Amino acid sequence: MDEIVVGIDVGTTKVCTLVGRVEEETIRILGVGLEPSEGIKKGVIVDLSAAAQAITRSVEKAEQTSGVEITGALVSLAGAHVSSINSRGVAGVSGEAIDEVDVERALDAARAVAIPHNREVIHVIQRGFTVDGQDGIQQPLGMHGYRLEVEAHIITAAQATVENLRQSVGAAGVDVLQFVLNSLASGDVVLNDTERQMGVAVCDIGGGTTDLALYVDGNVWHTMVLAVGGNHVTNDIAHGLRLPVSQAEEIKKQHGYALKSGVGAEEYFKVQPFGEDQPAQINRQDLANIIEARVGEIFGLVRQEIKRSGYDGLLPAGMVLTGGTSALPGIRQLASEALGMPVRTAQPENLAGLVDQLKGPAYATSVGLLQWAAAMTLSNALPGRDRSRRVKGESRMNPVKDWIKRLLP
Ligand SMILES: Nc1ncnc2c1ncn2[C@@H]1O[C@H](COP(=O)(O)OP(=O)(O)OP(=O)(O)O)[C@@H](O)[C@H]1O
Ligand SMILES: [Mg+2]
């Protein structure tokens, strides 16, 4: 197997293009193009040409480091315009045993729910099946039965917003093969199979968005995008301590702590405010106080969202935190207290090749896109599969070897 896969994570703070080669045990990173984002706010493009330029620079960098010409890629999607619903579809089984066509027909019926004309369907994920009244079936292929029902989770996004993103990526000479919701790409990378089976939440806190996905019984049951993230924390620090935003960002990363109680009352550090001769002393607890207030608020929203989903009792494996903001020391404890569940932080692991730049939780989405691309390549290689209609209910591939096992009948 020697497949080249490409993912472009268009985030609020960075654009990260990765070129990888699918190997038996892992994905080898061949090229990395990391560039600061421009023209993107809260996960949404607000300036087409600025965004297109940032994406182009990132793509060119990845092309240079990998020596691969990039013509198509999987692209991440986030923003408050994304929404999701659960739906049910039914199909009569055409032959003796249930085959892929039957599953596709049931999924088509599920997606036929009223979706407004200005929204685009991004994912149709199979959550579980019922065959002749017997529910709880995870893989119906090959089973005997007359009536197949599917429970689907359907993720849609505002068509105009998606089109702007497609256009910006297109301006870099790249076709969007598929959009992948941030939290689903990240979830692929940071969750393990046991957690997914038990019930777990993945929460990717980036710069402009907080992306949440709940997995129950091995599948995605609920997704949500909140338009808050680390940039809000930085802005609060800038306001609270009267510093320029760039400096606030710096001290957040250098001295930040998510819990006020985690730093000593007498801890001080120095900053050099612009236009001043003397460095200023800042109390680290004051900084932690500002951070705790905002990050605590984000987890309050996350908690509300989990409660509203109705699946709050179904997450014994707790929450896995990722995204750049989860690098904040103390955030695990804050989250665990605010949510009342076990929390761990996670970042991409088990990669080969150019991995130095990809250390840290900010790269979970980028690496996740490569894993999706690899899974797509594998499933497209199967007879009877059509890329445009491919439904990715079985996207839990870690490590790569498992993908093949799961995708091949
Ligand atoms: N060590 C750190 N401590 C605190 N915050 C950090 C640290 N490292 C990165 N961050 C924050 O992480 C955020 C960027 O995260 P990430 O790269 O995941 O976002 P993004 O993917 O660009 O944005 P989004 O997914 O929200 O569109 C920034 O707000 C940055 O300040
Ligand atoms: Mg992100």
Image (cartoon, helix red, strand yellow):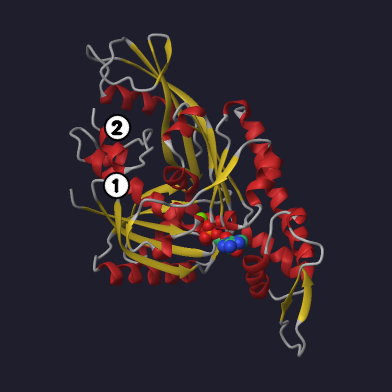
The vertical placement of 200 against 18, above or below, is above
Give residue 181's position: percent from left, percent from top: 46, 46
Name the mark on residue 374.
Answer: 1
Residue 268 at x, y percent in the picture: 77, 71
Residue drawn at point x = 36 percent, y = 51 percent: 350
Q: Is residue 368 visible?
A: yes
The amino acid pointed to by label 1 is Ala
Where does the image place residue 121, in percent across and percent down from the top left?
A: 44, 40
Q: In what element is the residue under mark 2?
A: helix
Which residue appears at 42% of the width and 9% of the height?
Answer: 133
Q: CA distance from mark 2 to mark 1?
A: 13 Å
Q: Residue furthest right?
A: 265
Q: Residue 385 or 4: which is nearer the viewer?
A: 4
Please, what secondary structure does the residue beneath circle 1 have? helix
Give the farthest residue toward the bottom: 277
* N-term mark: 2 or 1: 1
Tell how many labels: 2
Left or right of 290: which side holds 66?
Answer: left
Is label 1's Cβ within 8 Å of ligand 2? no
Quadrant into which the C terminus falls: top left
Tell me if residue 266 comes above or below residue 73 in the rendering: below
Which residue is depicted at the point 67% across and 72% down?
245
Q: Note whether residue 43 is visible.
A: no
Residue corresponding to mark 2 = 406
In depth, the one of 2 and 37 nearer the eye is 2
- Indicate whether 137 appears above or below 10: above
